Every structure is written in C-alpha cells, then in structure tokens.
Image (cartoon, rainbow, N blue to C red):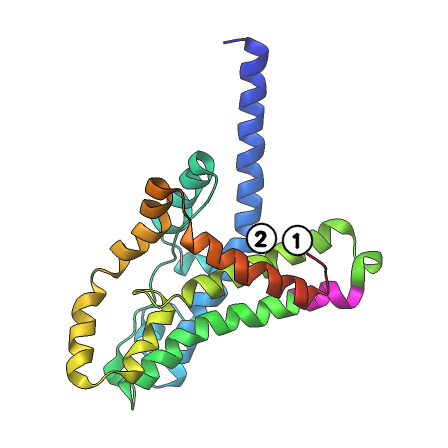
Amino acid sequence: MDPVRFIGLGSGLVGFLLKYILQFVLIILPALTLHEMAHAYAAYLLGDMTAKDAGRLTLNPLRHIDPVGTVLLPMIMLAMAGFSFGWAKAVPVNPSNFKNERVGFFLTSAAGPATNMVFAVVAAFAVRLFGPVALPLSIRDWLLLFARVNLVLMFFNLLPIPPLDGSRVIPLFLPDKALRRYHQVEQYGFGILMVLLVGIPFLFDIDPVGAYLKATVAPLLYALAGMRP
C-alpha cells in the first residue's frame, strides 16, 4: 500500500473515532442516562425500590453503561456498517411492588421515552427561539443532534417489541390467560428485533426500522425546531 495513502487512512480513522467519542460523551450518553434514570425514578415513585437499591436512581452515566451494548458494539457497527445499534444496562424493576402491576410497569416503561421527548423539545425549541443569528453554528448543530438522538431513542423504544418500552402497552389490554402466553413469547423479542434491524436489511435490502425512524424523527425535529426539510 502507498505509505501516503496508509497515513491518510490512519488519520481518517483517528478523526472518526475522536468524533464518535465526542458525540458519545456529549450527546448519546446523556440521552441514554436520562432515559434509564427516568425508568428508575418512575419505579421509585410508584413504590418499587429495586432500582434505587441497585444504585440506578442516579445521573451518573457509569451506573447505566453496558460495556458491550453501550460502547463496544455501537462503535464496531458504526465503523463497519455505517449505522449503530446498542443498549444501556436494563433497569431492574419488580412489578409486584406496584399497586397495579400492569399499570405500574407501563408507567415505568413510558417514563424513558417521555423523558427523551421532553429533552428533545427543549433542545429543538432552543434552536427555534434563539435562531441561527444568536446561536453559534456549532452550538446550534449540537443542540439539533441532541434533539435528534433523543427522538431516535424515543421512537425506537416505542416499538411494541420486547424488551422495548412500547411492548409494555400490550399487557394493559390482555386478559390473564393471554398475558401468560404473551410473557412466553417475550423471550423471542430480542431475536425478532435483530431480524428487523439486521436480517431483513441484509437479505432483502429493506430497512423497516430505518424507514420508520426516518418517517417519524425528521419531520418532528423540523417542526419543533421551526426548520424546513
């Protein structure tokens, strides 16, 4: 390989890693932390101390990081495939501590996406209120990116597939017998999610989750920030 080309490749990789690390620390990690802490706080308010006792009722991001799912896998996927997928450490919840198990579990799950929506609105409205004149371009870009990441987390977690938060809506409408069957099917949720995220795009060149996020995240972001597509 041409030494000059090799040096250029290395510097490009270093720049990519530095940019990813900066975005991860300033944008992705805070959004994930707020999401998970909201689950813990909602469970605490509803009478379940499990997350609090596990040290998850905190804004310390280190308490919510899964080394593989939060750091290693997303970086590898972004570098190799151009897109990223990952997860934070699951917040422990004991539904039996709720007065109403189904409602309590649903509200605890809904707190994560709801919190992401709140911070997406705050960041996007800051762009709308102050505008490109009052805000330096770099700050405006970071606010928009923070809003976008929060919206992606919200809409992705609203998918009704276990273990995502949206799946907690379904038990609200199931009779006890059907609920027991649903819990049996939940163990296959992660596999179904992987088929949607990786299997179908790879085999058929169709990205259903990507299309769903593109149809939801961008229009709402533009509307909140007062921007045109």
The verdict on residue 146 being magenta is no
Work out which residue is located at the far top of the displayed protein and give it. Answer: 2
Residue 48: x percent and y percent? 32, 81
Q: Nearer the viewer, residue 160 or 127?
A: 160
Residue 95, quarter of the rendered image: bottom left
Q: Is residue 42 visible to the viewer in this orientation of the structure?
A: yes
The residue furthest bottom is 99
Residues shaded magenta: 124-130
> CB under 8 Å between callouts 2 and 1?
yes
Residue ID at (55%, 35%): 16
Q: Is residue 219 left or right of residue 21?
A: right
Q: Is residue 150 visible?
A: no
Say what amino acid the circle numbered 2 marks: Leu
Q: Residue furthest right?
A: 133
Question: Residue visible at 32% across and 56% down?
Answer: 193
Label 2 CA crowd tier, 10 Å (few <14, some 14–19, many 20+): few
- Residue 127 within the segment the image draws in magenta: yes
**SS majority, magenta:** helix
Decide: few, some or many residues near mark 1? Use Cα within 10 Å; few <14, some 14-19, many ≥20.
Answer: some
Give residue 27's position: percent from left, percent from top.
56, 54
Three-letter amino acid code at the position of disc 1: Trp
Disc 1 is placed on an element classified as: helix
Residue beneath label 1, please?
A: 142
Quadrant occupied by the C terminus: bottom right
In what element is the residue under mark 2? helix
The residue at the point 32 percent across, 79 percent down is 105
Q: Nearer the viewer, mark 2 or mark 1?
A: 1
Q: Earlier in the sequence, mark 2 or mark 1?
A: 2
Q: Provide the residue designation for mark 2.
A: 26
Residue 85 vs residue 159, the one in the foreground: 159
Number of callouts = 2
